[in-house]
Amino acid sequence: MDFKLAGRRALVTGSSAGLGEAIAIMLAGEGVHVVVHGRNEDRTRAVVQRIIDTGGTAEAVLGDLATDEGADQVADQALAGGPVHILVNNAGFYAHTSWSNTTSQDWLEVYNVNVVSYVRMVQRVVPTMKLQGWGRVINIGGGLGIQPINDLPHYNATLAARHNMSVSLARQLSGTGITSNVVAPGAIMNPGVEQWLRQEAALKGWGADLEEMERNAVKVLVPNDAGRFGRQDEVAAAVVYLASPYADYVSGAVLRVDAGTVRST
C-alpha cells in the first residue's frame, strides 16, 4: 500500500534505538526523509546508515530534549535541511519503581523528560507546519495512561498527560491542516522488556524459554486477546497510518495498539 508520504520530512525523537528506530525505518520505507534523533552519536548515526543502506534517506541530529537549550539545538538542526512535516514525539524513559520508592525528584524528572520535552518540540516545530498548511504531530502514549497499574505511578501519570495534551493540541490546531494524535502501545517486546521478563521468570519459575516466558507473562501480568506481546513494527505501522493523508479525518484520537489489554471502548 502506498501511504502517499514520499517527499515528506519527519523528525522522530528518541529514534536511535527501540520503538523510535522501528518508526524511523518504516517511515523511510515509505519515502519519507527521516531526521533520526538521539543523544548517543554512534547509535544515532548507525540508524541513519541502516536507512541509507536499504535505499532510504535520513540524517542525524543530536541533543538532550530535557532542556530548552537541547531542544533548540535539535529543532535548529532538523529544520536546517527543510520543513518538518511530521513530528513523532517518542523520546522518554521510566524506572521500575513504585509508590514507596519513587521520590518527588523522580516525579519531576520523569515529567520533564516524558511530557515537557514533547511540549518543547511541539512549540519549536509546529509553527513551521502552519506555514505549510499541513502537518502531523504523533505522540507516543501508552495503555497505562488509560488503565494505570499499581506500580510506576510517575510513568502512568506522564502517559495520561501525553494523551490529554495531544487532544488539547488537536483543538488548538483546528482548521490549520495539522492533526495531533496519539499511538498508545500495550506491552511491546523489546530488549528492555526481554530483560525484565527474564528477571520475572527467574522469580516465578517460568523456565528459560523466551516464548514460554512471554505466554506466562501475558496470562499473569498483561492479559490480552492476542495472547502475546506486541512487536515494534506493529506500533510503527500505526504511526505511518496517522502520518499519511489517509488519516486527514483523524484528529485528537488515541489509537491503541494493545490487543485489547485496555478494557474500554
Image (cartoon, rainbow, N blue to C red):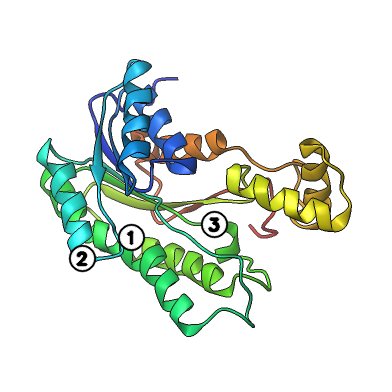
Q: Is residue 9 above or below residue 7?
A: below
Q: Which amino acid type is marked by label 2?
A: Asp
| Identity of the residue drawn at 62% across and 51% down | 186
Tell me the SS state at disc 2: helix
Task: Tell me which corner region of the image, top left, top right, bottom left or bottom right, holds residue 81.
Answer: top left
Q: Residues within 10 Å of mark 1 (few under 14, many from 20)?
A: many
Marks 1 & 3, CB-CB < 8 Å contact: no
Q: Which structural element holds mark 3?
A: loop
The residue at 55%/68% (across/down) is: 156
Classify 69 as above or below 186.
below
Residue 133 visible to an observer of this rendering? no
Give the left or right position of residue 30, taking residue 128 as reference.
right
Q: Give residue 68's mark.
A: 2
Q: Which amino acid type corresponds to the residue marked 3 in the rendered image?
A: Gly
Spatial distance from mark 1 to mark 3, Cα to Cα? 14 Å
- The image shows residue 260, relative to residue 28, as above or below, that is below
Tell me how far mark 3 sits from mark 2, CA to CA.
25 Å
Q: CA distance from mark 2 to mark 1?
A: 11 Å
Picture quadrant where residue 1 is located: top left
Q: Position of residue 143 (x, y in %)?
A: 59, 58
Tag of residue 142:
3
Residue of label 1: 118
Where does the image place residue 62, in percent across and percent down from the top left? 25, 46
Left or right: residue 66 compared with residue 139: left
At x 41% / y 63%, what residue is drawn? 114
Does residue 242 show up?
yes
Mark 3 Cα-neighbour bin, 10 Å: few <14, some 14–19, many ≥20: many
Name the disc covering residue 129, or none. Answer: none
